[in-house]
Amino acid sequence: MNDLLIERTSSAYTYPLLIKNLLAYPVVNNPDQEIVYRDQLRFDYRTLRERICRLANALTKLGVKAGDTVAVMDWDSHRYLECFFAVPMIGAVLHTINVRLSPDQILYTIDNAEDDVILVHSDFLPTLDAIKGRIDTVHDYVLLCDEQVQPETHVPLCGEYEALLANASTEFDFPDLDEHTRATTFYTTGTTGMPKGVYFSHRQLVLHTLGALAAIGTPKTQGRLHQQDVYMPITPMFHVHAWGLPYVATALGVKQVYPGRYAPELLLNLIKEEDVTFSHCVPTILHMLLSHPDVESVDLSRWKVIIGGAAMPQSLCLAALKLGIDIFTGYGMSETCPIVALAHVPEDQLDKPLEEQVEIRCKTGRAIPLVGMHIVDEEMNPVPADGESTGEIVLRAPWLTQGYLKDNHNSEQLWRGGYLHTGDVANQGPNGYFKITDRAKDVIKIAGEWVSSLELEDLIAQHATVSEVAVIGLPDDKWGERPLALVVPGESEPNEKELVSFVKSFVDSGRLTRHAMMLKVLVVDEIDKTSVGKIDKKVLRKKHL
Ligand code: AMP
């Protein structure tokens, strides 16, 4: 028995770390601050709180109760932000559906998460139509739309979001839940098979919010998020809660701008008209924005941008810096809530020429508060932080997923030895900065979305012209990576056009996401193998990239 364990006075309140507590500060201290949706809607934090209560009441009326799962298919919107709060605050789980998965994969995630209600934007009704009759758990579908038109669909909609909110009360007595209650779930496309569900509790989301706030909110100048900033995510809200930043921005009470479906002109216009000063996105999106002709008419010199989801190319970083953008890298993964590292530039290096700053801004970053980030070899021995020796990044932090939903085998694999294994290979310099140099996991990231190389290999191998195939990620300035299939000929000479159209047939049937069609093909005589006869991707990458 430990005498120092704190004894609780019977009437003392043990404050649980709950998402509802993140909302209390801005509503009291910044009630007039605005939430903006495209060029269509704006309201203040007072109204945000009321709308969250209305949504909680509307969901309750639909029969949603603690322990149920409410799923969302929407672009980045004020509605999504409201769901980020209302759904977990009533004790239900928010499933943020990855709308870029193939219909079959989406169906799998709906089944696996056991969704009870789906809130669906009219743009995604065709996806649900494609899997109609195969969804077993959902009892209600709520329509999200930007225009007052009745969509043509077979989905049995029970009502429209705004109409349901209009009829609901602006007060809701949110319960004091156990802080370990599951708040969110979403799916990551793994190396093989169907997507894997990760999940986070109220406590984890609150601690992630505070950890990220401590890291982003405290540098003296560079890359600092503060009360006067205007925040706009350019990361899908289904992707790790838009990297958790909507929770951070709301907790701070800053003005927030939600852009809906991404279109370069609209995004640039919102930056200009709403004075957006803080965003985050994958490199592909920034590349798209900077290549757009409108970029010349927008002053980007007050814009701070975290680039994550993939390594930032130095050329992109330099181009952004030359436009005055304060750009730097963030690192994390779906399993990590996600932020675990940021590549802020130390204050004493900010007067260095831009060309020299690029190196540090493109590193993977330093661990943020409360994150234990280590590089280890295959036996879990530490690798020296000499800027050269490489090993796998393993992690401990209070906000890492505790496993994969209903998947013991992969959960144990993820957490072997008591550390979360990232599958990312990196070195660490004496200054604490990590730099990812390779990937141990067999996946390709195209425009921020995973495509499993193993699945592509399986499917391509079925083509008559293919005797053997290995797929690796080919670095690409625009897309981040594209799949490169190294093919040993079968019955006849394989050709790229035929193989891409073969892959398209699996996209059309819902098996693969459309990103798989970015395939490039290279015919080779043989494919290198390891000593145990496995395809040696390390050697193939060295040879062909
Ligand atoms: P996801 O689970 O889709 O968020 O993907 C996480 C993975 O993206 C990581 O494990 C890395 O492989 C990659 N990634 C994320 N951020 C970075 C970064 N800053 N540099 C290089 N790779 C990154």
Image (spheres, grey):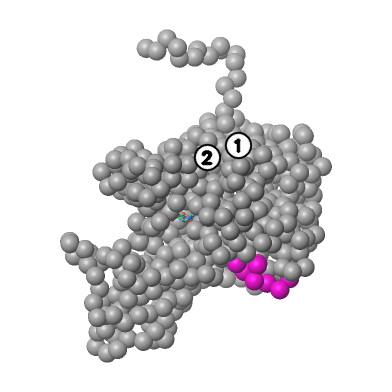
What is the crowding at mark 1: few (fewer than 14 residues within 10 Å), some, or many (at least 20)? some
Q: Is residue 122 left or right of residue 374?
A: right
x then y, percent, for residue 477:
52, 69
Furthest residue toward bottom:
492
Mark 1–mark 2 Cα distance, whole angstroms, equals 8 Å
- On whether residue 256 falls in the magenta region, the answer is no
Above or below, 116 relative to 495: above
Name the amino acid type tagged 1: Ala
Which image quarter: residue 308? Answer: bottom right
The residue at which mark 2 appears reads as 368
Q: Which residues are magenta?
A: 286-294
Which residue shows up at 45% across the image and 56% down it? 188
State which tag comes first along the sequence, 1 or 2: 1
Name the amino acid type tagged 2: Ile
Using the image as rendered, state which of residue 373 and residue 174 is in the foreground. 373
Using the image as rendered, state which of residue 315 and residue 498 is in the foreground. 315
Using the image as rendered, state which of residue 174 and residue 43 is in the foreground. 43
The residue at which mark 1 appears reads as 214
Disc 1 and disc 2 in contact, CB within 8 angstroms: yes
x then y, percent, for residue 480:
50, 66
